[in-house]
């Protein structure tokens, strides 16, 4: 479980708080999506939960950030990484640069935390199978496409088996099939009790997989609700969050007087099929 | 300026053949989207345009040049290439310097350099960040700096590798506007994208790739109904086309306004 209470943060050498008054909880086995404009502080928030801020990057952090009731900033980084797995935004930067093969790259964290060799081999091969990258294991991490590199970065974090995962746009380089696979894996992990906080622009996937969505704007959580309620909110555009074409089409139809103004707007394909079928039947 | 791939094959030193016999002509001023799953050979193909890769077989023509006879520096006066990862591209200490670098190398005088920097910053919404170090910007902003740097080159051909990834709503709209404005100037835009909605709304031609080969080629209306080719390439049609199909429509709406007008006509047709 992740719990943030009244969290505020200013980067080193500045007194401007980029995050202020953040209250957010992710329960055991829950997936919470965070959406918001670029530059609104999502990456900063991810680093705070993972304990990189303030332990590595410095700055002023107020309020409390706990993972399973333990204040994350009180842990040495080596222990923090055993609690929270962080998939960073740019997979090109997640690759350690110290390893010659994908296999060693994925094993890097396990190696550093002293996992026995036999167990390490099993865990690496299991996670490679899960993410369908077994065929890449003997390649150099630098001979991968953007999408392949992203899957390797995700594998190197998931392999650690942390109770909490923070994922900063983990599907940005992936095609639709790959993106869906990652979300299916997330669902399987949460079924097993992992808490997941995910920053994602692909809102249709959040509609299907998140339990809740929080909107980050002006350094605060300005709104939190079910995925369908948040993603059809009329203020979405003002938060610079994209809506699906399903939502846009339904809103345009509603505004043109073609559909019932009271009906909840759709987000996904199945929502919108229902929406337009009932609307037509009702007319 | 016309582009022509003529029977192009490319194998990596590892032996993996990423491009397997592609012939494709792109007329001057066309907006072409290349789609297909990760590893389909899209990036390998377009990297032939600026000479990063040379075909193992076949030829690539950029205007009256064949790329095999030209240096990357020569080709960069004709082909502006925005990398998927902006950190492969940006190097200067300020955004302004990064954007001015291209025009400077093309021999523009300082006044012209400044004019192009200002214009590119405006198009990409980065004017207030001109004097910032690119690494103090967010990933999506750095991506837009990379786009601005290429726009300032004023090349007749612009290649955008995954221009919308990591962009928020405002960023996606900006990239769409840039694409349209390049087209209005008669410049060719080739984009690699996984965002089929962005593709349907902004490109007049779509090429679908899988396993190094072209699976389908045509207008979005023509391509996005070729179910078998799309499945083979693991490409999903844009959302509105999927919805129209579910609702049993015979039309293929690409934009929200087309869908809404379809709602009245298709509604009447079925009632």
Image: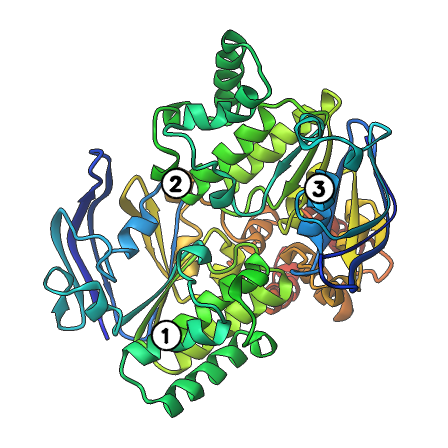
Image point (45%, 79%), residue name: B181
The spot of residue B247 in percent (x, y) is 62, 49
The residue tagged 1 is B101
Classify residue B235 by image quadrant.
Answer: top left
The spot of residue A45 in percent (x, y) is 73, 48
Image point (65%, 62%), residue name: B263
Which mark, residue B228?
2
Inter-mark Cα distance, 3 to 1: 37 Å
- Which structural element holds mark 1? helix
Q: In the drawing, does residue A147 fall left or right of residue A87?
A: left
Q: Are marks 3 and 1 in contact (CB under 8 Å)?
A: no
Which residue is situated farthest in the bottom direction here?
B111
Give the chain letter at badge 2: B
A120 is higher (above) or lower (below) than A128: above
The spot of residue A151 in percent (x, y) is 49, 35
Inter-mark Cα distance, 3 to 2: 52 Å
Classify residue A11 by image quadrant.
Answer: bottom right
């Amino acid at each position: 479980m992740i719990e943030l209470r009244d969290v505020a943060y200013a980067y080193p050498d500045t007194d401007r708080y980029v995050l202020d008054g953040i209250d957010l909880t992710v329960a055991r086995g829950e997936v919470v999506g965070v959406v918001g404009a670029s530059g609104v502080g999502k990456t900063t928030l991810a680093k705070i939960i993972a304990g990189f801020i303030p332990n590595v990057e410095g700055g002023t952090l107020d309020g409390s950030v706990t993972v399973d009731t333990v204040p994350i900033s009180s842990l040495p980084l080596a222990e923090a990484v055993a609690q929270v797995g962080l998939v960073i935004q740019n997979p090109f930067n997640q690759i350690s640069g110290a390893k010659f093969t994908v296999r060693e790259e994925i094993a890097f964290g396990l190696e550093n935390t002293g996992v026995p060799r036999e167990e390490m081999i099993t865990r690496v091969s299991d996670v490679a199978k899960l993410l369908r990258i077994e065929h890449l294991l003997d390649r150099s991490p630098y001979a991968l496409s953007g999408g392949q590199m992203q899957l390797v970065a995700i594998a190197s974090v998931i392999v650690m088996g942390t109770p909490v995962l923070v994922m900063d746009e983990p599907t940005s380089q992936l095609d639709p099939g790959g993106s869906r696979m990652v979300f299916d894996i997330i669902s399987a992990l949460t079924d097993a009790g992992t808490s997941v906080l995910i920053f994602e622009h692909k809102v249709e996937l959040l509609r299907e997989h998140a339990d809740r969505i929080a909107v980050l704007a002006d350094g605060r959580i300005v709104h939190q609700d079910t995925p369908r309620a948040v993603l059809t909110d009329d203020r979405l555009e003002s938060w610079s969050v994209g809506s699906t074409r399903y939502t846009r089409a339904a809103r345009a139809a509603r505004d043109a007087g073609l559909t019932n103004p009271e009906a909840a707007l759709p987000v996904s394909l199945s929502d919108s099929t229902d929406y337009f079928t009932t609307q037509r039947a009702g007319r | 300026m016309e582009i022509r791939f003529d029977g192009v094959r490319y194998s990596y030193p590892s032996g993996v053949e990423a491009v397997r016999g592609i012939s494709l002509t792109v007329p001057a001023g066309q907006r072409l989207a290349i789609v297909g799953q990760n590893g389909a050979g899209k990036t390998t193909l377009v990297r032939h345009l600026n000479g990063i890769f040379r075909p193992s077989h076949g030829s690539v023509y950029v205007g009256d040049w064949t790329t095999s006879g030209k240096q990357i520096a020569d080709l960069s006066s004709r082909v502006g290439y925005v990398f998927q990862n902006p950190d492969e591209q940006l190097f200067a200490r300020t955004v302004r310097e990064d954007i001015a670098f291209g025009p400077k190398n093309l021999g523009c005088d300082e006044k012209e350099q400044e004019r192009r920097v200002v214009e590119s910053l405006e198009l990409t919404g980065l004017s207030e960040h001109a004097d910032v170090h690119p690494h103090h910007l967010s990933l999506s902003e750095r991506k837009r700096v990379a786009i601005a740097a290429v726009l300032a080159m004023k090349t007749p051909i612009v290649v955008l590798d995954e221009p919308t990834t990591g962009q928020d709503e405002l960023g996606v709209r900006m990239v769409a506007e840039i694409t349209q404005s390049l087209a209005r100037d008669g410049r060719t835009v080739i984009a690699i994208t996984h965002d089929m909605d962005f593709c349907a709304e902004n490109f007049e031609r779509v090429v679908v790739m899988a396993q190094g080969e072209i699976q389908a080629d045509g207008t979005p209306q023509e391509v996005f109904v070729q179910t078998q080719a799309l499945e083979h390439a693991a490409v999903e049609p844009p959302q509105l086309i999927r919805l129209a199909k579910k609702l049993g429509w015979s039309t293929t709406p690409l934009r929200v306004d087309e869908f809404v007008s379809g709602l009245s006509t298709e509604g009447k047709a079925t009632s």
